[in-house]
Image (cartoon, rainbow, N blue to C red):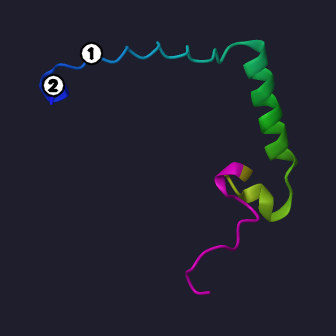
Amino acid sequence: MGGLFGGAPRPPSPPPPAPDPDKESPLAKEAERRRRARIAQRGGRASTVLTDALGGGAGDYGGTDLGG
């Protein structure tokens, strides 16, 4: 019961968080340009969907329990 009343040592502090990525770096700008180009190349119904494949956009028609 010594741990209940402060007998246990304190855990180590967590490491500092990683720095945020620089949005003005050439790599970030190139990635944003490629992302915009992929969106612009879409055609038909897929061009109106604003989410990417990871967000469950176009092509995500099944897997629900609502209505069947």
Residue 34 to residue 12: above or below: below
Q: Write down the quadrant of residue 21 in the picture.
A: top right
Which image quarter holds the N terminus?
top left
The answer to whether residue 52 shows anywhere in this view is no
Which image quarter holds the C terminus?
bottom right
Q: Residue 44, image x and y in percent?
A: 84, 63
The number of numbered discs placed on residues in the rendered structure image is: 2
**Labelled pair 2, 1 in contact (Cβ < 8 Å):** no
Which numbered marker is on residue 2? 2
Q: Residue 51, image x and y in percent?
A: 67, 51
Q: Which stretch appears magenta?
A: 54-68
Q: Residue shown at 81%/23% (left/top)?
A: 30
Looking at this view, is 22 or 19 the one in front? 19
* Residue 25 lies in the magenta stretch: no
* Residue 59 lies in the magenta stretch: yes
Q: Residue shown at 37%/14% (left/top)?
A: 12
Looking at this view, is 47 or 8 the one in front? 8
Give the spatial CA distance, label 2 vs label 1. 11 Å
* Residue bearing the label numbered 1: 9
Q: Residue shown at 18%/19% (left/top)?
A: 7
| Residue sitting at the far front | 1
Looking at this view, is 59 or 35 the one in front? 59
The answer to whether residue 11 shows anywhere in this view is yes
